Each structure stands twice: as structure tokens, then as C-alpha cells.
């Protein structure tokens, strides 16, 4: 490879830059976790070890409620987005149909669109739609759980579809044909051949969708109702008022949730890589 | 008359069957795509069109929007000094963020690409983990670190530099943005450096190019697609950033994302907010086209 011709100073600089990058990426997260156990009332000051702030979370009914909303939104939107995203991935990779190109382009937009634009779109849409429903049926709908789920699905279908498509593209199409030659009907071929093969991609897509749903602040802030707010939106409003030791503790819990999901996806990729290796041997 | 069908008829019959099979196949594809297609049209394309329509509408004195008097007023407003300053400020901040990310990420990506497979994978996973962790929490961590009396300030005070007052300045926003989007720069850069044909570098050294010269004339041009892709991936979200400037900039100097949100939630000027969102999206679309042209899709 390379590296042989690199001068010692350059090599040293490269090495220390890389160490600094890793430190830069991890120090804030680690310090946050450390300070969440600090006994001081001032959030950035060390005042002895305590778990008081975590204990307080269990008594905070507002936080409990928003955690509940977040989890329910994430689960419902992930299930819907995973099913719809997988279906569109299969359709786009395996079939030709009228409107395919338009659909393909439409599925790229949510990935590149800025959060703020997406938020504005959803807010305007629901305002208009609710006015229309009120006019036609006299139903006074309001923003809340359903509008959050609908918005999260709207951006997550695209992400799931991209991940699953990557998996299908790397898959051997002749396996499905072999199943058909062996008199499997379409459903059987899908159930016993295609689905097990794309399963890691589907799972990976679902993990991404759940992460994005739990992460989202901007879109949710626009479409949440007064009664139903997700944890990130609530925490965001708290942080704007100022930092508190309780926010440190909530943040660490959110951090742990996302780290669990990352660990899941890394383990998934590893399992995939191992299976790929044993298959090729 | 023959009892057996002639060859021509047989061929047409077969062609017909094949055509029918193809039609059935197309129908199946459409059927499979239909639920999400319909969903995306209703909950994405229609909202997009609504934003476009609103950007041509008029704001009435009461703050509501009149959908009758169509004009380009909202777009003309974008040229006014207040909005123009917000746009310029956002562009400058996004550019600074992009350049800083590039300067930090290039050596890191180069270092990664020249390691053994194990070290390289470890480093890449190490970059990916913060990228997957909660965005809000990552921004909050910096708010905590930079707060007055916080860790960084007490550190600089203890070594005799006096307390630092970075929070709620442009510097804090740039730090937050670099922190948030650095992985977006590292990954495409790594992909392009990893694919570099090192024989070309060796050839240049054989032809007596110095280390820096061979970097400038061989390595850098060959990894340009990665540089372009990474820059777009950092610049685009930095332009539309909302959470980071709100938390670290303290809302003192409005950036594009915050300005749009204000137009909707407090100023109640939907047409201006809509036109700005649309301009922002146009910037993203153009950048994406450049990204694909630069081969970003293959990275």
C-alpha cells in the first residue's frame, strides 16, 4: 500500500490529527455522561457523585409522558414505514411499471430536503387538510399523535427504501428464478427465498427509521399538538430555557437509547459479513 | 385449410402470451408500489405543492394568508436587506463549517485509508457511532461544555487564560455544526482515498515529485469527487440548520432555518416563510445534482 514514502513528521501529524478527531467526537458525549452524575446544581460544575437527577426523572410525570409518546410514535411509524419502504424497494428493483421514474425521484426528495422545509410542508398540509375536513364534514380535527406519525412515515419510507434497495441490488436474482423453476408460486418464492435474503436490509432500514423518528425535533415541533409532544421536542424547549442537571440525565438516557440502536445495527452488519464469508467459502 | 395452426399464427399467439405476461408483470409492480406511491403523493408531493402555492399568496394585515391575490411579493421580499443578511450570514457560516470539516477530515480519512483492515474498520465505526447518536443530545453536550462556569471555561481559567465566553457566539455555532456534520465529510473522503490507485502516486515519486507535489498533483485531483461530495453533504445541512444555531447561537443572530421557523410560528408571514423554504430546497436540489455529477452516488 502507501505510507512508505511519507515523511516521519507528516506521519506524526496524521496520527495526532486522527487522535484529536476521535477525542473531539467522543469527549463531549463522555463529559455529558460524567456531569449527569454531578451533585452540583450548576450543570457544568462537578460537585461529587450523585444519582439524584436520574431519580428525579422517575418522578417527573411530564417527562414520563413524553417518553411514552416518543416510543409509541417511533414504533408505529417504523412499522408502517418499514412495510411501505420494503414494498417500494421491491417494486423499484424488481419490476418495470408506469410512473417508476417519478416514484423513484419522489423517494429521493425526503432524504435531501432540509428538515425545516419538510416541517413547513407538513404544517401547511395539515392546516389545509383540517380546514377542508371541517368544511366538508364538520369535523374539528387537531394536530397530535396521528399527525406526528404521518409525518415521520413520510420521511422514513424513503430511508427504509434506500437501505432495502441496496440489499436487493446485491442479491442474486437467479435464486428467485430457481425457486420459480422448482414450482414455487410467487408468494412462496417471496416468503421462502426473497424475504430471508433481504431480511437484514429490512431490519437495518427499520433500525434507521426508529433512530430518525426518535431523533426528530424540527418536523415534530411543527406537527405536534398541545397534548402530545415527543421527548426531543420537550427537551428542546427545556434547553432553550437553560441547562439543568435533569436535562443532563435525560440526555444520557436518550444517548443510551441511540447507542443501543447503533449496537444493534453494527451487530447486524457483522452477522451479515460473517454469513457472507461462510457462504462464499 | 389445415387443421394444425401455421407457424405464423403460433408465433403471434406466443408473442401475445409474452406480451400479456409482461403486462401482468408491470401491473404487479405497480400494485406493489401503489400504497407507498399514494402515501408519498398525498403526504409529500401535495404538501410540497401547497408550499409552492403559498409562496405566491398574500399576507393580510391580520396575519392570515389570502389565497386569492397571487403575486411575487414574497420572493421580492427576499431581496430586502433583513432577509438578504440572514441568507448571507447562513451561507458564510455554512462555508466556514465546510472548510473546517474538510481540513480536519481529509488527513483523518487519509490516515484511515492507509491503515490495516482492522484499524480502518475500528476507526470508521468510531466515526459512525456519534453520527447515529441523538442529534439534540450532541448539541446539548456542547451547550454544557461551553456554558459559563462549565468545563472548558474552568479549564482555561485554571491554566491562567481566564474564563472563555464562547457560548451564544458564531464560534459556538460553527463548533456545533462541525461536530454534527464531520462524519458526512469523513465518509465520502475515505471512500475516494480508499479507491485511489497508489501505483500512480508511486509513479509520480519515481519521476522525482516531492511528497507535497505528488499530493497536490496526483492524490488531491484523484480524490476530488470525495471532496465535492463531502463538501455538499456538509454545506447543505449547515445551510438549513435550525437546532444547532438555536441552542448554541442563542438566537442572537438569526440564520436561515430559524428565520423560516419564525415566519411560521411567531411572525405569521407564511408566504415569506414558504418562498424561503422553497429557495432553500432549490439550493439543495442543485447541490444534489452536482453531487451526482461528481460521482457522489458511487461513493
Image (cartoon, coloured by chain):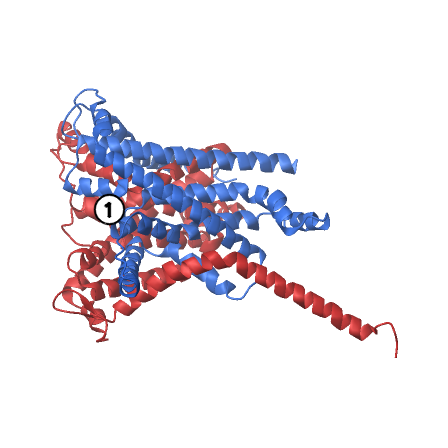
Chain colours: A blue, B red
How many other residues sit within 10 Å of disc 1, few (<14), some (14-19) or many (≥20)? many
Residue at coordinates 64% horizontally, 64% vertically from top-left? Answer: B22
A228 and B133: which is toward the camera: A228
Q: Chain of mark 1?
A: B
Give the residue pinned by disc 1. Answer: B244
The percent position of residue B126, horizontal first and vertical second, equals 40, 35
Query: Residue A6: in sight, yes or no?
Result: no
Quadrant (top left, top right, bottom left, bottom right) of the C terminus of chain A: top right
In this picture, residue B115 sits left or right of residue A187: left
Question: Which residue is at the far front?
Answer: A138
B71 and A222: which is toward the camera: A222
The percent position of residue A104, horizontal first and vertical second, equals 47, 60
In this picture, residue A93 sits left or right of residue A114: right
In this picture, residue A198 sits left or right of residue B131: right
A159 and B16: which is toward the camera: B16
The percent position of residue B135, horizontal first and vertical second, equals 30, 42
Q: Secondary structure at mark 1?
A: helix
Please tell me whether residue A42 is drawn above or below residue A94 in the rendered image: above
Query: Residue A244: in sight, yes or no?
Result: yes
Could you tell me how many numbered marks the image carries?
A: 1
**Quarter of the figure with residue B86:** bottom left
The percent position of residue B101, horizontal first and vertical second, equals 32, 46
**Quarter of the figure with residue B291:** bottom left
Question: Which residue is at the far right?
Answer: B2
B160 and B269: which is toward the camera: B269
Amino acid at each position: 500500500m502507501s505510507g512508505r514514502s511519507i515523511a516521519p513528521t507528516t506521519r506524526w501529524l496524521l496520527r495526532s490529527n486522527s487522535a484529536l478527531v476521535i477525542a473531539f467526537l467522543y469527549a463531549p458525549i463522555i463529559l455529558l455522561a460524567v456531569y449527569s452524575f454531578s451533585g452540583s446544581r450548576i450543570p457544568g460544575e462537578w460537585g461529587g457523585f450523585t444519582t439524584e437527577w436520574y431519580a428525579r426523572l422517575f418522578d417527573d410525570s411530564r417527562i414520563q409522558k413524553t417518553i411514552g409518546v416518543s416510543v409509541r410514535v417511533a414504533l408505529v411509524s417504523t412499522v408502517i414505514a418499514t412495510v411501505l419502504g420494503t414494498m417500494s424497494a421491491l417494486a423499484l428493483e424488481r419490476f418495470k411499471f408506469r410512473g417508476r421514474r417519478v416514484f423513484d425521484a419522489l423517494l429521493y426528495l425526503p432524504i435531501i430536503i432540509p428538515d425545516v422545509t419538510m416541517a413547513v410542508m407538513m404544517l401547511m398540509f395539515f392546516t389545509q387538510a383540517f380546514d377542508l375536513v371541517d368544511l366538508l364534514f364538520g369535523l374539528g380535527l387537531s394536530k397530535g399523535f396521528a399527525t406526528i406519525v404521518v409525518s415521520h412515515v413520510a420521511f422514513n419510507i424513503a430511508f427504509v427504501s434506500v437501505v432495502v434497495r441496496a440489499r436487493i441490488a446485491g442479491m442474486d436474482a437467479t435464486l428467485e428464478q430457481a425457486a420459480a423453476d422448482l414450482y414455487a408460486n410467487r408468494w412462496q418464492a417471496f416468503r421462502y427465498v426473497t424475504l430471508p435474503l433481504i431480511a437484514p436490509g429490512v431490519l437495518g432500514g427499520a433500525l434507521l427509521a426508529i433512530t430518525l423518528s426518535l431523533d426528530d425535533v424540527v418536523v415534530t415541533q411543527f406537527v405536534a399538538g398541545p397534548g402530545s409532544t415527543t421527548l426531543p421536542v420537550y427537551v428542546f424547549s427545556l434547553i432553550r430555557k437553560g441547562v439543568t442537571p435533569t436535562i443532563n440525565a435525560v440526555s444520557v438516557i436518550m444517548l443510551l437509547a441511540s447507542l443501543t440502536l447503533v449496537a444493534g445495527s453494527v451487530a447486524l452488519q457483522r452477522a451479515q459479513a460473517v454469513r457472507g464469508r461462510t457462504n462464499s467459502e | 385449410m389445415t387443421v394444425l395452426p401455421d407457424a405464423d399464427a403460433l408465433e403471434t399467439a406466443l408473442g401475445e402470451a409474452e406480451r400479456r405476461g409482461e403486462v401482468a408483470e408491470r401491473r404487479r409492480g405497480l400494485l406493489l408500489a401503489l400504497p407507498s406511491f399514494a402515501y408519498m403523493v398525498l403526504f409529500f408531493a401535495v404538501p410540497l405543492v401547497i408550499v409552492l402555492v403559498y409562496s405566491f399568496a398574500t399576507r393580510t394585515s391580520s396575519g392570515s394568508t389570502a389565497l386569492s391575490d397571487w403575486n411575487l411579493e414574497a420572493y421580492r421580499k427576499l431581496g430586502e436587506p433583513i432577509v438578504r443578511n440572514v441568507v448571507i450570514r447562513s451561507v458564510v457560516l455554512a462555508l466556514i463549517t465546510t472548510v473546517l470539516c474538510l481540513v480536519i477530515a481529509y488527513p483523518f480519512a487519509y490516515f484511515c485509508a492507509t491503515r490495516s483492515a482492522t484499524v480502518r474498520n475500528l476507526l470508521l465505526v468510531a466515526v459512525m457511532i456519534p453520527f447515529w447518536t441523538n442529534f439534540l443530545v450532541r448539541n446539548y453536550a456542547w451547550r454544557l461544555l461551553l456554558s459559563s462556569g462549565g468545563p472548558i471555561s474552568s479549564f482555561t481559567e485554571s491554566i491562567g487564560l481566564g474564563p472563555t465566553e464562547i457560548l451564544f457566539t458564531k464560534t459556538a455555532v460553527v463548533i456545533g455544526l462541525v461536530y454534527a456534520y464531520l462524519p458526512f465529510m469523513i465518509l465520502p473522503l475515505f471512500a475516494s482515498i480508499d479507491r485511489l490507485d497508489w501505483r500512480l502516486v508511486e509513479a509520480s515519486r519515481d519521476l522525482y515529485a516531492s511528497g507535497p507535489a505528488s499530493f497536490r498533483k496526483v492524490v488531491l485531483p484523484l480524490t476530488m469527487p470525495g471532496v465535492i461530495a463531502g463538501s455538499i453533504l456538509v454545506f447543505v445541512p449547515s445551510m438549513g440548520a435550525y437546532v444547532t444555531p438555536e441552542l448554541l447561537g442563542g438566537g442572537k443572530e438569526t440564520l436561515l432555518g430559524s428565520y423560516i421557523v419564525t415566519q411560521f410560528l411567531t411572525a405569521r408571514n407564511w408566504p415569506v416563510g414558504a418562498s424561503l423554504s422553497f429557495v432553500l430546497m432549490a439550493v439543495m436540489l442543485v447541490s444534489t445534482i452536482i453531487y451526482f455529477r461528481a460521482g457522489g452516488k458511487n461513493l
